Image (cartoon, rainbow, N blue to C red):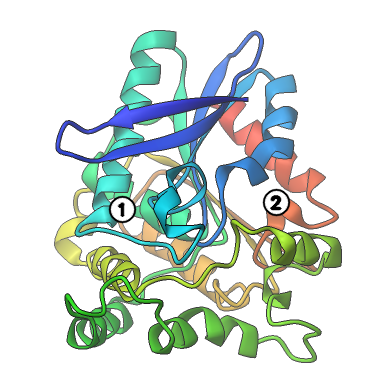
Amino acid sequence: MDIYFLDNGRGKTIKGRAFVAQEPKVNIVFLTGMCEHATRYGQLGKFLNEKGISLYVQDAPGQGLNIDKTNDKGPQEWELNDFDDTVDFAFQKIEELKKDTSLPTGIMGHSMGSFMVQRYLERHPGTVSFVGLIGSNGPCLAKMKISFALASFIVNKRNWDRPSHFIQSMGLGAYSRAIKGAKTPLDWLSYNEDNVKAYADDPLCGVRNTNGFWKEFLRGMSHLYEKKELRKISRDEKILLLAGEGDPVGEFGKGIRRLYDMYKKIKVKDVKCIVYPNMRHEIINERENKQVYDEIANWALHSL
């Protein structure tokens, strides 16, 4: 497991972890979810490496390797336009890998990372061999526009770097409330209690995001499903959608199916959707994750 570093030449940098196969056939650039970090994907990386797939997991700004040590692992902080800049960093890494390895290279993402991958398809169409969206949701443009307008009203220079209470409660708090009979506020993540405990015990997971983070996240989300943006998506993309039926982020299977219908409506030729029963948000960390791992590997190797 190595660390890689990217500089966009405009004052921003980002880091990630590379899990490189001994004899690679395919590359995957992977974008993580909110309030987590790249090291959590070590088990997936080991599995993929054995299949000849190299995995490059990019930490988001303010997460994992990109934490500013002066904030003492405090709330996740974002700067202006960090959503789209993070997408563009992924493009930078993908182009670098295509040049250096001459191997098929795809992009995948979990949760927040999956929405960034959706944005990637609009900003950099036709530049990857395959796509994977894990724990995602489908078009909800009006909701995102309203949420961004609310954040813009609430967030200002004075409270930008302060931990968010109200917006976070509306966002992540809603997922906790959606699970009936939950033992902990984090049960929405997984049926696997060991995974929930590991997340809760990890000092780099579950931090409270700042007001500025939420404004910039919602800024990025507010563009996703605009007609002018959807028209930019290449119809030749190969898109895999994976979700748990018990995942509130994907509206318990409804949202991910709506996303599938959206891609089919705009005539993307190759779209596959799997909704796993008895799984919640972090399908990669459920006890039955082997079938998820196999699907990810097969989709990547299908590009050969």
Look at mark 2 in the image and give the residue it sits on.
284
Name the one closer to the observer, 59 or 142: 59
Look at mark 1 in the image and give the residue it sits on.
119
The kind of residue on which mark 1 rests is Arg
Residue 234 visible in the current orientation: no
Q: Position of residue 28 (x, y in %)?
A: 51, 31
In this picture, residue 144 sits left or right of residue 24: left
Quadrant holding the N terminus: top right
At horizontal 38% and vertical 51% (from top left) the residue drawn is 61
Name the one closer to the observer, 233 or 21: 21
Compared with 195, 51 (above or below) is above
Quadrant in the picture for residue 207: bottom right
At horizontal 52% and vertical 60% (from top left) the residue drawn is 111
Quadrant in the picture for residue 298: top right
Q: Separation of disc 1 and disc 2 at Cα? A: 22 Å
In this picture, residue 26 sits left or right of residue 280: left
Compared with 185, 98 (above or below) is above
Secondary element at tag 1: helix
Q: Position of residue 140 (x, y in %)?
A: 35, 77
Q: Residues within 10 Å of mark 1 (few under 14, many from 20)?
A: many
